[in-house]
Each structure stands twice: as C-alpha cells, then as structure tokens.
Image: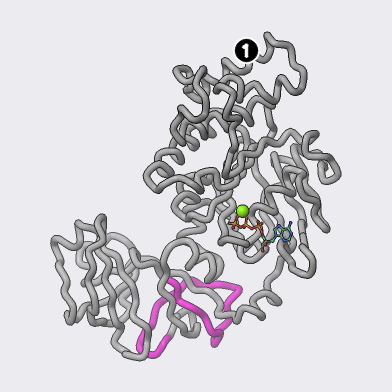
Amino acid sequence: MKDNIQTNQAAVSVEGVSKKFGAAVVLDDINFSVLEGETLVLLGASGSGKTTILRIIAGLETPDSGRVILHGKDVTELPARARGVGVIFQNYALFPKMTVEGNIGYGLRLRGRPKSDIAEIVNTLIELTHLEEHRRKHPSQLSGGQQQRVAIARALAYNPEVLLFDEPFGALDAQIRTRLRREIRALLREIKVPSIFITHDQEEALELGDRIAVLNQGRLEQIGTPYNVYNKPATEFVATFLGAANLLLGIVNENRFEAEDIFLKIEPDPKIRDGQSVKLVFRPEDVFLRRPENLTQNYQPLVDGIVEEVNFVGAFERVVVRLNISTRPPILVTRPKSETTVFPLEPGVKVPVGLVRFRILPNYTLASERAARVI
Ligand SMILES: Nc1ncnc2c1ncn2[C@@H]1O[C@H](COP(=O)(O)OP(=O)(O)OP(=O)(O)O)[C@@H](O)[C@H]1O
Ligand SMILES: [Mg+2]
C-alpha cells in the first residue's frame, strides 16, 4: 500500500523494504512516511514485524531490499550511530548506578562534549521532562513513569532527528500505561520530534498516533488517521484487529447490499461490481436497537432480532442479538448508559436492528486478496 505523502516533505520514509530471516518473509514491501513533528503508530500482533522495521530504520538491521530516507537523505548504508535516530526500547535499561543527570548526559560524555555544554543540555532536558526534583536520584528511586521520562531525555540528548519507541510501556500495568501515554503524547507534541511508536495495544494506538499504520504478518494493511482506520477499515483484518466488528456476508446489487432478507443502500464504489461477494462490516457501537425516532444520524434498518444476552460491563452494556434468520451468527451490540436507562433490554425481547454506520469490503479469500491487491 502506498502512502500518498511525498517523500520530500517527510522526516522518515521507508520505501519498498523487505526482509527475510532464513526462508521466512518477515517484511514484505513496506512503504510509509512520517511527517515532521508527527507521531506514527505501528500497530500489529506479536511477530508481525514491528521491531524489525524499527531496527531497520535505526540501522541495527539491514533490509534485503528497499531504502530508508531520513530528511531526504538515503541512510540505508549508514551505520546506526551516524543516523541521528534515538531509540527507546521496552526495557529502557537506565544505568542503575548513575543519577538521573548522569543517565541523561551519558551519551554526551561518551562523545567528549565539553562539560559546560553537557550541563546546559541536561538542564534543558530535565526541565522539558519535568524531572527537576528527581535529578539527583538513582533509577531505583523513581517510579516507572519517571524512569520512562529519563529514558526519553537520554535519547533526546543526542538531538535526534527521529525518535523510535518500541513498546515502552509493555511491562507496566494498565492504569500507569494510560497515564504515561498522555504524558508522552504531551511531550511529543511539545518537542515536535517526528516519532514512530510501536504497540500492539489498539487503545494506545488510537490515543497516541497522529496516524496509525496497521501491520499484518509483514505487510502494511492500512495507514491513516485513527478516525479513518477505525471507522473506515480497508480490510477485514484492520476491522477486527482495531476493535470489535460484526461481519455479514452478502452480495452487491444495484448499489444495495443484499443478504437474504437484508437490504442496505450503499454508496457506489468503483472497486465493487454488481453480483460481487462482499462483507458488511459494522462496529458494536454503530448498531441501534430501537426505532430511530429522534435520531439525527444516518440510519438504515437491518432486520429484526432477538436479544440473547445482556451484560453490564461498566461504562457500557454489551448485548448479543440474534438476527431473525437463525443460521447467522449473533451480532454484538454495545449501548451507552444514556440508552440503557431509557430503553432497558432483557433476553428474549424482539428488537428492530438498525445501523448508523457500516463498511462494505470485498469478500476476498486470503490468498486471492494478496494476489489482487495493488501495491
Ligand atoms: N534475528 C532474527 N532471526 C530470525 N528471525 C527473527 C529475527 N528477528 C526477528 N525474527 C522473526 O521475525 C518475525 C518478526 O519479528 P519482530 O520482532 O519484528 O516482531 P514484532 O512485531 O516486534 O513482535 P512483538 O510484538 O512480539 O515484539 C518473528 O517471527 C521473529 O521470530
Ligand atoms: Mg517487537
């Protein structure tokens, strides 16, 4: 998939990068760009090739083919230390016997920078990462979040052109992750250094990324804003990996989606022909379970259904609904509190099922999907 951003405005461009380890294809023709000041999230399951992409950008791994361009310069052949890339790994391994100041200035001392320069840069970074009261502490005396900020300050000391994060919150619990994510987002906004952030956590991806690139088994499935990737998934993989999605098989006929007793008006799509087998994809929160009296959004009735299960899950309610042809798998619906209070549901109740948003995707089998896809 081509990113429609021109290489010459990009801070980082990965062009046609492929990589095998032995016989295994780990990256297959990867193309994407990161703009100045932008945070791109690389999202994919374990083993999909995320770290390998990062290592190739950083110069810690060589691609079999393709190029890495940083600010217009081809760095594919350059060694890691000549690239100006700062990397923050999952175990950001601070030096335990050094203070916060010592850790941040370490790389500068190694490069023989004058003491006064080092002191000035370290001061600026300590201020930027709000570590003033911790500057003389050792890593063991810091919280996970504070250690994370030291690791970022240490990477920033080199004045990197690009920052790469490889699942830096992997080892931390959910509550801390959420807080750190916000802190890092604010920091990245402030320093405006273009960055690539790896995660396999969809919520993290949606919250942190200016854009998200979804990786599946070494291939880029889609790249776009969090809004577009979530609401307009280009493939079934993206739809199901990024949140829950309901799928119904059908065909397209004269700008309608048809599946037995279901008919939905759809936008004409030049990629889809009449008679073509397609999938209707819709998210649990885009289903509406009553007549849309005062609904201002687009709404189309799907078919009637029977409520099978109602589960309270904190912030919202999860409802399982069987559509009226019993051979279909049941669909999942989520309802906000505003809806559950005025319109309570219980198992066995018959409800009208309608959609406020959906996508139509071609129903490729996996192999033909690969062959047919234009890269
Ligand atoms: N040096 C190597 N030699 C052989 N195979 C490797 C090597 N490095 C990575 N791989 C393989 O390449 C694939 C992609 O690995 P990679 O580390 O990029 O995945 P990842 O997306 O970062 O996964 P995770 O989320 O688990 O960190 C995996 O199947 C892995 O086993
Ligand atoms: Mg990894």
- Looking at the picture, does residue 177 appear above or below residue 342? above
Left or right, 354 with respect to 165, comes to left
**Viewer-side residue, 261 vs 180:** 180
Quarter in which the N terminus is drawn:
bottom right
> What's drawn in magenta, residue-wise?
259-281
**Residue located 56% across and 52% down the image:** 212
Q: What amino acid does circle 1 point to?
A: Glu
Quarter in which the C terminus is drawn:
bottom right
- Residue 327 belongs to the span the image colors magenta: no
**Residue located 17% across and 80% down the image:** 349
Question: Could you tell me if residue 168 is visible in this image?
Answer: yes
Furthest residue toward front: 97
Characterize the local packing of mark 1: few (<14), some (14-19) or many (20 or more) Cα atoms within 10 angstroms: few
Label 1 residue SS: helix
Furthest residue toward right: 77
Left or right, 372 with respect to 285, comes to right
**Residue located 15% across and 66% down the image:** 343
- Looking at the picture, does residue 289 appear above or below residue 317? below
- Looking at the picture, does residue 234 appear above or below residue 256? above
Label 1 within 8 A of ligand 2 by Cβ:
no
The percent position of residue 151, horizontal first and vertical second, equals: 57, 32
Q: What residue is shown with label 1?
A: 120
The percent position of residue 45, horizontal first and vertical second, equals: 56, 61
**Viewer-side residue, 170 vs 64:** 170
